[in-house]
């Protein structure tokens, strides 16, 4: 059994066949954490967790791209959407977080890759930081971990996390999902007690024009302690190399497991067991009791 620790089967990319995709994933022995990105997708994440007990759990939160209205485009996945402006409604998300199938808060964090043109950068940073702080308050109220989304902002993100921890927050820590940074950044998160999540990006071929990001990421996979990583797809995004150009599905997480086993020169079984143990420890559930 493999656990996809971060997917979005409630997104519009699956609006015509979500249940088919979920059932296919279950048949392949993969369980899922369905992660919210705004109020509607967080609500649907909880609904799917209710619909598929023992197979799906939920995380609820407000992704930074939904803080400001903007056109968002992920070129390689050919996915485009217009985000509507939303602010974190503590009461709404508190109600969702009280559901027994909600095991984390997020995804939330600092996003500097997608920058809306209608707001100064410093103001954007302030709004995103405050959003993150509010999520951490909610996480601590329910003693839940936080799922961090960080893109091209690790320096600011780690400093913000340090300040919150210094103030007594983020008691359950969390995971930096879809990690794409280097070992220096990874070490900082690890030292603060966080897990690192790997996606299909680790299977991608390096760009000949710039090999370093791939080399940096593979170094993290090679060095990370085996009790501090999770595996994920971030589907519908980031289909592994074997499926590039297709819509990703949660069962494709098996390709991430295979790649980690190859890099670490250990068995697929060991990677699967380590990832599952780490998932259960972070999100505080035990599959044997389901």
Image (cartoon, rainbow, N blue to C red):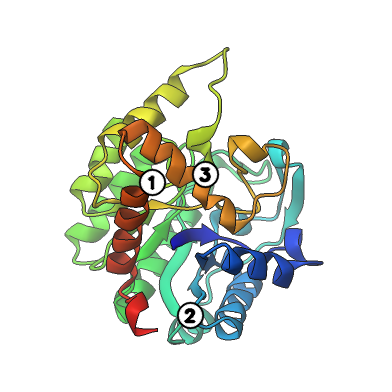
SS of the residue at dot 2? loop
Looking at the image, is mark 1 or mark 3 earlier in the sequence? 3
Q: Quadrant of the N terminus?
A: bottom left
- Is there any visible trace of residue 196 in the rendered image? no
Mark 1: few, some, or many residues within 10 Å (few <14, many ≥20)? some
Outermost residue to the top: 209
Q: Is residue 148 above or below residue 182?
A: below
Q: Nearer the viewer, mark 1 or mark 2?
A: 1
Mark 2: few, some, or many residues within 10 Å (few <14, many ≥20)? some
Residue holding disc 1: 268
User: In screen coordinates, is 72 left or right of 103?
Assistant: right
SS of the residue at dot 3? helix
Residue holding disc 3: 255
Q: Estimate the x, y position of residue 113 in percent, counting from the top left.
A: 56, 38
Res 133 → quadrant:
bottom left
Looking at the image, is mark 1 or mark 2 earlier in the sequence? 2
Give the Cα distance between marks 3 and 2: 23 Å
Give the camera-side residue of 134 and 154: 154
- Is there any visible trace of residue 105 in the rendered image? yes
Q: Nearer the viewer, mark 1 or mark 3?
A: 1
Q: Residue at x 49, y 84 (%)?
A: 91
Q: Quadrant of the C terminus?
A: bottom left
Labels 3 & 2 near each other (Cβ < 8 A)? no
Mark 3: few, some, or many residues within 10 Å (few <14, many ≥20)? many
Residue holding disc 2: 54
């Amino acid at each position: 059994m493999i656990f996809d620790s971060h997917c979005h089967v409630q997104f519009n990319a699956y609006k015509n066949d979500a249940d088919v995709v979920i059932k296919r994933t279950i048949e392949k022995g993969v369980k899922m954490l369905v992660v919210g990105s705004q109020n509607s997708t967080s609500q649907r994440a909880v609904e799917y967790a209710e619909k598929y007990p023992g197979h799906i759990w939920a995380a609820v939160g407000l992704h930074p791209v939904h803080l400001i209205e903007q056109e968002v485009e992920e070129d390689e996945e050919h996915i485009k959407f217009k985000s509507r402006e939303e602010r974190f409604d503590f009461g709404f998300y508190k109600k969702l977080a009280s559901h027994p199938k909600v095991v984390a808060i997020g995804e939330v964090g600092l996003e500097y890759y997608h920058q809306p043109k209608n707001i100064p950068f410093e103001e954007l940073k302030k709004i995103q930081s405050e959003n993150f702080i509010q999520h951490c308050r909610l996480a601590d109220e329910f003693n839940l971990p936080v799922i961090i989304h960080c893109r091209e902002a690790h320096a600011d993100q780690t400093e913000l996390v340090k300040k919150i921890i210094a103030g007594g927050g983020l008691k359950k820590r969390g995971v930096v999902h879809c990690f794409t940074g280097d070992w220096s950044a990874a070490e900082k998160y690890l030292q603060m007690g966080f897990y690192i999540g790997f996606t299909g990006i680790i299977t991608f071929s390096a760009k000949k024009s710039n090999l370093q990001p791939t080399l940096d990421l593979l170094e993290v996979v090679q060095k990370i302690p085996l009790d501090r990583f999770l595996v994920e797809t971030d589907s519908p995004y980031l289909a592994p190399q074997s499926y590039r150009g297709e819509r990703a599905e949660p069962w494709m997480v098996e390709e991430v497991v295979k790649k980690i086993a190859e890099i670490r020169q250990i068995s697929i079984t060991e990677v699967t067991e380590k990832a599952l143990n780490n998932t259960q420890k972070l999100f505080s559930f035990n599959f044997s009791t389901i």
